[in-house]
Image (cartoon, grey):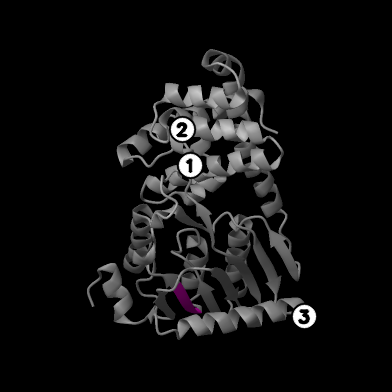
Amino acid sequence: MASDRVLENAANEVKEFAKMGLLRKSVPAQDKVLLKCPSLRELPQTQEAASELPTPQFEYLVQAIVDAVDAIELRGHRLDAASLRALFGLVDPVRRANWSRRQEEAARVQGVGRDHFRRNLQAPLLKAIAELLLSGSSEQATKNAEIQEQFLSAAPTQDGLVTWMTKYIVDNTPREAILLELSTATIGPILDALRAANVEARLLVANPYMAQSAWLQERHWMTLLNRFQRDFAGYANLEVRMYDVPPSLRGRLIGDWFSLGWYTYRDDARLEAAEDPNAALIFGHDNAMIHGSVVSNSGAVLAEWFRKEFERLWRHRLTRRGSDVGRTLGLQD
């Protein structure tokens, strides 16, 4: 449980996002808000979303706030959730409205006046979101830290699994590794350990230009470009291919151990038109993952299934290979 001071600070930072509204903003506007939100920037999930670009942290926090509003509704507080959606500009009448107008709409949902809402209801609602953001981060960190060498287990996110798998590589030098990823943005330690041990590895990544939103395209492209120019240089035992089909499965089979998860799609409620192709946001880093060993019967079934799916995508006609991968990223042959 977060202290009162920490919770109050986080609630004030959530308010900065509410005052701004959650419609897409320019990078300078994102930077301005992030500078006012040190507590939210330091959340483990936000740090994991960080890269050379500011946009991923901002986008993660926006989606985390939207998810928190959904969680409030699932807990039975439908009126509060509807009021919060109005406050953040997530519903049609007030998507482009200013802060005062959105406060008025949030108050109308609650059946009170704007002044009453602002003095009595607004702070508790924003604090409820902050509490969900902070408690979710703490619970996930605790559960990820509990990962043991069980034959088959589940983790709420991949954080602890990346640490565990990195240590496994360092301690055991496995003979082979296959990895199915989106952009590799969150598995740097695993890739570094594989290269240091010179493990024979095959890596499948998504074509960054297939991402539906511009900021995702830029983030994925920048991540992969840096990997090829810096991390993969001289790694002769690594082969990388790039798939053009929509991302769905994610996983790693390294030696006798595997981690499996999924990419899921969430609605970008900030967009006015639901049919906008950017309305489908892809997420994976904060999804649950299965972790296990091929030694167990269940683990062997899952590992074999993952290997078959990996091989199918590896050979897929819409998977780029060889110099075509480099050309897609703008690298010279």
In the rendered view, tell whether residue 247 sits above or below residue 19: below
Q: Nearer the viewer, residue 112 or 68?
A: 112
Residue 54 screen position, x and y as percent = 38, 45
Q: Amino acid at mark 3?
A: Asn
Residue furthest toward the left?
332
Q: Is residue 162 visible?
A: yes
Q: Give the quadrant of residue 258.
A: bottom right
For mark 3, give the secondary structure.
helix
For mark 1, give the secondary structure.
helix
Q: Which residue position holds label 1?
A: 62
Residue 115 screen position, x and y as percent = 53, 13
Q: Return the mark for residue 17.
A: 2
Identified at 61% across, 43% down, the residue is 70
Q: Amino acid at mark 1?
A: Val
Lower sequence index among marks 1 and 2: 2
Q: For residue 164: magenta?
A: no
Label 3 to label 2, Cα distance in Å? Answer: 48 Å
Q: Which residue position holds label 3?
A: 297
Identified at 38% across, 34% down, the residue is 96
Lower sequence index among marks 1 and 3: 1
The stretch in magenta equals 200-204
Residue 187 screen position, x and y as percent = 50, 62
Q: Residues within 10 Å of mark 3 (few under 14, many from 20)?
A: few
In the rendered view, tell whether residue 273 sits above or below residue 193: above
Mark 3 vs mark 2: give the one in front.
2
Residue 146 screen position, x and y as percent = 73, 54
